[in-house]
């Protein structure tokens, strides 16, 4: 662990790890309008969400590898610079293919906030402290996908799509300035530890502990971002909510993380991590069933439908808030010799899973609202099977 004086401020960690999620979700209220502006259909716009995760996966490998060789601080600063370039591209282009390229560049840059920030946390805290830090961080981060649609809704209402990407460009500039002035270097062995990335990849690919935990994280992120990708079409197109109203629904969803953080703090005093993960997965399945039941019940009016649909997602987010901090904390406990690269490969894996789920959702996207909740039931069931198989060998005990 690093000396306490070289630990980054918690507020800065939150900014760095939160802005990629805001960048992903802030323009979701503008998705229907964006399709019109770029003269394309909804499926291409859905693909812009999937390609963000492809870029994120590329960025995870790039910045994690560079963090072990040139340092955590330079990797953060260069990544933010690339994010600003991608945001400017999204602001200026008028063709869907150039827009997708700009989103890819934006995502590669944004990934530094996720992977290198997690690496710095692993530099500075032991495993028990990490679980608490990740739980606190997840409680705050759960607001970022909600803050994104809320801000995006008001931006679209009052400034159009241009205002959304102008805001992202400015946000990247401000966060980059904060990191330049306030972010310390936390890595002690930068460039001195010799290892082969290919060898580490093979070792991690054979590690059932890593494979199981990474799959769970990917499934949880996949469910979260499928909701934020699909819900604008549900609430804005089908239910005729305004973009601002949709943003407030997202803010209500984010309060689930506060509840999950409080439950996590209580449960960690007397339960092993693997049991908390299992509880979270059962909660996720319960929320998926509530969403599906709401969609299949005939004759529901708008308000009861919104309560049931959004309430089911609230339950799912409570489940992810319980399980995910422990998956992230325990996933790389045996790879401290090159934690930046290990974190990059781990992140690549679970974001590929997330991107794959997003890709499936973009293919399944249709006029039937029940498609996404049914997919969530399948995903939550798969996650439970993975966990139950892993529990037999106590892979998740911390």
Image: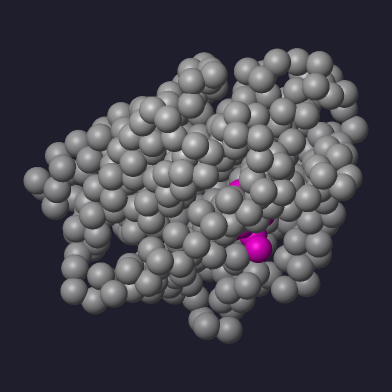
Say which of 133 and 125 sits in front.
133
Say which of 167 and 70 sits in front.
167
Q: How many marks?
A: 0
Residue at x 9% of width, y 46% of height = 392
Does residue 161 sit above or below 132 in this rendering?
Answer: above
Residue 86, by quadrant, is top right
Residue 195 position within the rendered picture, expressed as x and y whole percent measured from the top left = 44, 46
Residue at x 52% of width, y 44% of height = 303
| Quarter of the rendering occupied by the C terminus | bottom left
Q: Is residue 325 left or right of residue 164?
A: left
Q: Please, what is the dominant secondary structure of the magenta stretch?
A: helix
Q: Does the magenta stretch include residue 319?
A: no
Residue at the left extreme, as displayed: 392
Say whether residue 261 is visible: yes
Say whether residue 218 is visible: no
Q: In this view, does 64 lie to the left or right of 276?
A: right
Residue 108 position within the rendered picture, expressed as x and y whole percent measured from the top left = 66, 39
Residue at x 60% of width, y 66% of height = 13
Part of the protein shown in magenta:
15-22
Residue at x 20% of width, y 36% of height = 385
Does residue 222 sit above or below 41 in this rendering?
Answer: below
Say which of 204 and 237 sits in front.
237
């Amino acid at each position: 662990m690093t000396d306490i004086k070289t630990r980054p401020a918690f507020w800065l960690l939150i900014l760095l790890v939160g802005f990629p999620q805001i960048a992903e979700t802030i323009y979701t209220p503008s998705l229907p309008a964006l399709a019109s502006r770029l003269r394309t259909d909804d499926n291409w716009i859905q693909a812009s969400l999937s390609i963000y995760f492809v870029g994120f996966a590329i960025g995870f490998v790039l910045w994690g590898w560079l963090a072990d060789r040139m340092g955590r601080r330079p990797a953060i600063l260069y990544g933010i610079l690339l994010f600003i370039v991608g945001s400017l591209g999204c602001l200026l282009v008028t063709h869907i293919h150039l827009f997708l390229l700009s989103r890819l560049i934006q995502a590669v840059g944004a990934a530094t906030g996720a992977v290198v920030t997690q690496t710095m946390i692993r530099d500075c805290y032991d495993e028990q402290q990490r679980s608490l830090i990740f739980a606190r961080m997840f409680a705050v981060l759960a607001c970022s996908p909600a803050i994104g649609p809320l801000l995006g809704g008001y931006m679209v209402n009052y400034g159009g799509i241009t205002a959304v990407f102008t805001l992202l460009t400015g946000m990247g500039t401000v966060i980059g300035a904060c990191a330049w002035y306030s972010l310390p270097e936390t890595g002690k062995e930068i460039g001195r530890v010799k290892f082969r990335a290919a060898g580490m990849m093979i070792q991690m690919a054979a590690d059932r502990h890593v494979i199981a935990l990474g799959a769970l994280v990917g499934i949880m992120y996949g469910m979260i971002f499928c909701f934020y990708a699909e819900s604008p079409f549900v609430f804005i197109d089908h239910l005729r909510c305004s973009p601002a109203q949709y943003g407030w629904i997202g803010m209500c969803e984010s309060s689930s993380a506060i509840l999950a953080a409080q439950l996590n703090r209580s449960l960690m005093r007397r339960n092993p991590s693997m049991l908390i993960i299992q509880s979270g997965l059962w909660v996720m399945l319960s929320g998926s069933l509530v969403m599906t039941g709401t969609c299949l019940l005939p004759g529901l009016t708008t308000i009861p439908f919104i309560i049931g649909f959004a309430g089911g997602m609230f339950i799912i987010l409570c489940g992810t808030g319980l399980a995910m901090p422990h998956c992230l904390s325990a996933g790389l406990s045996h790879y401290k010799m090159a934690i930046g690269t290990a974190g990059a490969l781990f992140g690549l894996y679970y974001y590929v899973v997330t991107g794959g789920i997003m890709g499936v959702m973009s293919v399944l996207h249709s006029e039937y609202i029940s498609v996404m909740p049914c997919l969530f039931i399948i995903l939550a069931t798969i996650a439970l099977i993975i966990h139950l198989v892993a529990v037999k060998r106590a892979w998740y005990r911390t």
